Amino acid sequence: MDELSQSFRVLGDSTRLRILRLVAEAPLNVTELVSLVGVAQSSVSHHLGKLRGLGLIREERQAGFSYYSLALESADSRWPLIRLAREAEDAAGDSARLKDLLRAREDRQALNERLLEPGQSWFLWAGALASLLPPLDVADFGCGSGPLSVATARWARHVWAIDQNAEALTQARERAQREGRANITFLLEDLHRLSLSDGSMDLVVISQSLHHVESPASVLSEAARILKPGGRVVVLELMPHDERWVLERLGHRHLGFAPEFLESALSEAGFTSFSRETHARDGASPFRVFLLTGVKP
Ligand SMILES: C[S@@+](CC[C@H](N)C(=O)[O-])C[C@H]1O[C@@H](n2cnc3c(N)ncnc32)[C@H](O)[C@@H]1O
């Protein structure tokens, strides 16, 4: 009886009730709780101490952080309090914020796993593994200021860097010069109508350019046309998003693509053997990218 009345007293505070409801959904640390509940860290720690004192929550250490989670079992006579806390109105929008936080946490974990710590050794690994490829002829569709063309020229036999923007091509040329890459040809052309011959390339890379073009389907047909049989296309694109400002400010024509849509466009263009990988969200960015590859039979 004593424990029950004490619990009623402690949960008579709405912030404490919100904290209990949050940790009942997922283990959370103090910093996460501060961002969710919007009160000072000292106050969150005080509330956590009270809840822990009553055995409602427990503290566990993981990777140097203390995580708080529900300790109460459903057989406990105080369990109805948890049910009531869960059913209470969520006027502060805690549950939506918690969902966002858990998604960001998952994305961060996925990103960390990709980054092969320490530092950015993944970048060196990418270069080292690419240098094992046979000498390839590569077309970079919509090369912009040329970061990918120049990186590719380290291991390719020859790169054709293509863009319809003369200023971007000048920057790409200067970048190639700075890095001493002489195996790049710069083409000021429209990706819908290329001058490159049929069956002349081993690889076409299209990095974030398709969302700029009028007809992604005809650009992919051009990729299929200029590739040799057995040649490959690699597309890096944005997932569908709602950031409409990019239409006017950045000249995008498409608000990202559903990977299935681009895969069927590649199939229509004659590609087969697809692989697809969606990448983790990068911090607070609203954009998320995916990679799609296909082979010309
Ligand atoms: C976002 S940038 C991508 C730059 C580069 N591929 C990268 O990943 O850093 C898109 C580029 O596509 C070019 N582009 C858009 N439509 C094009 C078209 N129809 N023909 C040729 N280039 C085009 C733009 O000029 C721009 O430089």
Image: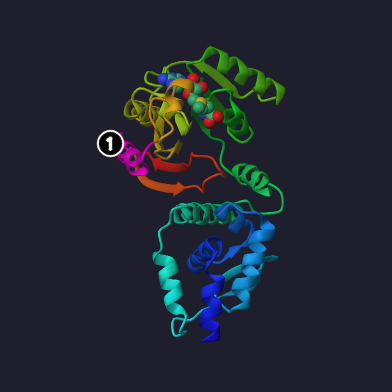
Whether residue 58 is situated above or below residue 146 in the rendered picture = below
Q: For the view shown, which residue lies furthest in the left direction?
A: 268
Q: Quadrant of residue 172?
A: top right
Whether residue 54 is situated above or below residue 271 in the rendered picture = below
Q: Position of residue 219 (x, y in %)?
A: 37, 26
Q: Nearer the viewer, residue 170 or 4?
A: 4
Kindly identify the amino acid type of the residue bearing the numbered disc 1.
Answer: Glu
| Disc 1, SS | helix
Whether residue 282 is situated above or below residue 205 in the rendered picture = below
Picture mark count? 1
Whether residue 256 is situated above or below residue 144 in the rendered picture = below
Q: Quadrant of residue 296?
A: top left
Q: Is residue 15 left or right of residue 214?
A: right
Residue at numbered disc 1: 268
Color encoding of the figure: rainbow
- Which residue is painted at 45% across and 56% down in the image? 95
Q: Is residue 63 visible?
A: no
Q: Is residue 267 in the magenta section? A: yes
Mark 1 C-beta closer than 8 Å to ligand 1 = no
Q: Position of residue 48 (x, y in %)?
A: 62, 68
Q: Nearer the viewer, residue 259 or 179?
A: 259
Q: Is residue 12 left or right of residue 175?
A: left
Q: Is residue 45 in the magenta section? A: no
Query: Which stretch is magenta?
Result: 257-270
Magenta region, mostly helix, strand or loop? helix
